[in-house]
Image: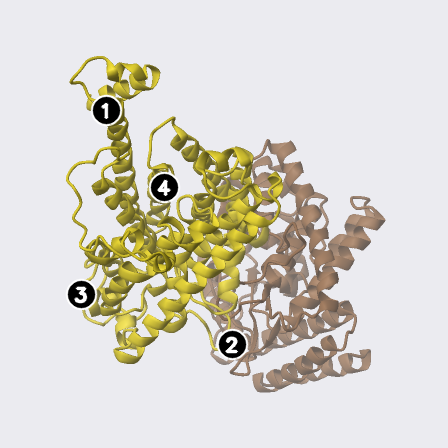
Chain colours: A brown, B yellow
Amino acid sequence: MSQMDLAQRLLEINGAGTLQQLRTIREEVQERVSSLLREEYRVVPVVEALNELHDALIRRVLTLAEQDTARMGLVAPPVPYAYFLFGSGGRGEQTLASDQDSGLVYGDCADPEEAELAAAYFGALGSRIVASLFEIGYPPCEGNVIVSNPEWCLPISAWEQKVDRWFAEPSWENVRYLLILADARLLAGDAELGRRWKGRYIGDMMSHADIARRMLENTLRHKVLIGVFGQLFVEHYGENAGSLDVKYGAYIPMVNIFRLLAMRADIPATSTLGRIRALREIGALSGDKADEAAWAFEVVLRLRLLASDRDDNGQWAGSGKLRSAVLDKEEKAPLKKALRICRRLQRQLEKEMQRRFGGR
Amino acid sequence: MLKKSLLGLGALLLLFPTMAFAADGDPSAATLNMGLNALWILVAAILVLLMQGGFILLETGSTRMKNAGHVAGKTIFTVGLASLVYWAVGYGITFGGDASESLNKFMGIGNFFFDPSILAGEGDSYPATIFFIFQLAFAAVSLSIAWGGFAERAKLSVYLIFTIVFAAVIYPIIAHWIWGGGWLAADGAQDYAGSTVVHLTGAMAAFAATILLKPRIGKFNKDGSANEILGHNQVFTSLSVLLLWVGWFGFNAGSAVSVGEGFFGYVAFTTQLGAAGGAVSALLISWLVKGKADIPSMLNGALAGLVAITASCAFVEPWAAVVIGLIAGVLVFVSAQFFEKIRVDDPISAMSVHGAAGVWGTLANGLFATQKLVDQVGVGKAGLFYGGGGEQLWVQFLSVVVCGAFAFAVSFVVLWVIKQVSGLRVTEEQEIIGLDLSEHGTYGYPEALKRAGTNTTSL
């Protein structure tokens, strides 16, 4: 996709007045990206362009949703808000079929009455955003990490209390929430408020031994799908027999590893490649290791994108599972190499865990 | 108390064989020897019969709840029916001595409706009654192996008809060939306790059945990929393997049919090593290949180790017993995947556990049999690795091919005829509702399953 193309598309998005228009633009862009991927384009520029488009689409939806909410007669309270993306959106790694993982934070109000009004307003706005995004083809997050959920749409003071509680009680679930926050990226709204919110927990996480241990465990939870004989662990049964779970067997393990390393080094970048670059700059990864890691991640990212396609109803769907038919021999070799690199990184982390925490 | 005094008596007799001559009127050494043999063989026969408990749990645990009562109950029924048929016909075909010399190469005649003398005769090393029970238990085991290929879809009437043919003709003829003085016995085929006679025969019948019955509903998708139909109780399956493992000491060590100088102890010893090897290697290979250590694979591995060592337990050294078991464990894992790939639905892996491992165990004699042990048993020659050349291996190969082909062909023909005449398989509705209800009218787990067809399709 050329720069011209992209700029043109972004303009179209910003000028779109209805969800239907946005949906059409998205469809066209995705068709184009889908064919680009198959033509062996380098994956990184494609993913970057695709995510710029996703970002633009979501921002436009936010604007339209604000207008809709105003039309419903709700008055915006005099406090700023910030809209965050989590998950692949937060990392700038959305595929053709990503769901919505989002959070909203707004400024504290002067008095309780105003606070109540603000809660009602942002609740309505959140619901509107989620419904609109659904209309243009972004299904809601299955884990309910989404702005229409009141737990993820809060004033900053409530957010801070909540995060403090997670720190105080690092149960498996709470640590998972903290890991979700680590990928948060401000997409729209008040930058100052966003910085304040992120600053509250970033940099603090790894100083808690308990949390560090649990994060390590959580990070290593997904096994890389390659066996000692270099064989891929494909699905044996069912409709997906013969396919490889690229998402949980390759992509997520790599994301997890570099998220953890980045958090430990206080790196604010949220994209995996950005994290690898930053780790190299501060010397946490040698040049060779960083190149190798980036190469492996690109291989996996490309296959992850290939794993999303249209389903029978014409909807974009990403099971994260790659049919073996898509994987020809030429693609298998680099994938296996990438998985071996990933497994080696996991092992290193595992060993470190044994050393630091005396094993499980 | 009784056990203790018997043990004491046995030990004393072994240490001081002259004690038996101590005084006039006391039993002779021969009588005591006979008595000890009789005791051991009857204990072994009971152990082998108890293996049916293993088959009940194995087959039930590996299949779904809606068929549990049927799967479990039919085993007892067919053991009963097979006993009557074997008594009337089968035993005579295996061991009857009235056939002419040429016919005897193929089958025996005589002793139909077996009416044994009530005591051991002069010079007998055990009573015929006990030998009959022991042999009957083997026939019943072979039959229960075959049922694996019928599971969850055959009509009850098919069980009835097939039991009659199997216990009267198929099993007795093969047993005659190798154990009853038939043509393979003359060739020196080594199958100590029945890797071929019992296990391969049963597996081949299962294979024929599974081909004719076709896969269970929902096992394979249109595109050829398989679905996993999980057994409903892994605890049953594990317990079944323990029962079978223990019963196997009767199967193998009992096949010594004597106490004598204690050779049956050596047989028990190699049996344990083979089973252990199979369990260990199967778990490890499934772990390495699939990334998850698969419990059903491991259980099949233990059984495959037992099946394989069954032919060779009296002919091989301890290290070879371990190797035979280890290889059997890997083989059963590979074989199960192979059968699934060629779209044969084998719910309890009968073909892999009893077929593939049975073939391997029989062939293993041709490789690992030692001269010393061959002399001890008195059958065949030493194997390839012990200076015997390829001769024994060829005999073993021949016995596998011929017995396997015969068992498969006859089973296939019999089942094909049944299929043409009355059909083998229950209707689709019956299969979906479950055989408990369609064949017997009540569920094995009545409280867990609704009676009317409201919620049964999702089971």
Rate crowding at label 1 as few (under 14), some (14 to 19) or many (20 or more) other CA atoms within 10 Å: few
Q: How far apart in space, not on screen, are marks 2 and 1 (Cα)?
A: 61 Å
Location of the C terminus of chain A (image quadrant) = top right
The residue indicated by pointer 1 is B3
Q: How far apart in space, not on screen, are marks 1 and 4 (Cα)?
A: 21 Å
Callout 2 touching callout 1 (CB < 8 Å): no
Q: Which mark is residue B248?
A: 4
The residue indicated by pointer 3 is B440
For discs 2 and 1, the disc positioned in front in the rendered view: 1
- Chain label for disc 4: B
Residue A21 picture location, percent across and down:
61, 86
The residue indicated by pointer 2 is B223
Q: Are marks 2 and 1 on the same chain?
A: yes
Location of residue A95 by image quarter? bottom right
- Chain label for disc 2: B
Residue B333 picture location, percent across and down:
51, 54
Q: Earlier in the sequence, mark 3 or mark 2?
A: 2
User: Foreground residue, A310 or A230?
Assistant: A230
- Chain label for disc 1: B
Q: Which residue occupies 28% across, 51% down? A: B97
Q: Earlier in the sequence, mark 2 or mark 4?
A: 2
Q: How far apart in space, not on screen, are marks 3 and 1 (Cα)?
A: 42 Å
The relative height of residue B198 versus residue A102 in the rendered view (above or below) is above
Q: Which residue occupies 55% across, 83% down? A: A314
Q: Are marks 4 and 3 on the same chain?
A: yes
The relative height of residue A17 versus residue B174 in the rendered view (above or below) is below
Residue B394 picture location, percent across and down:
56, 53
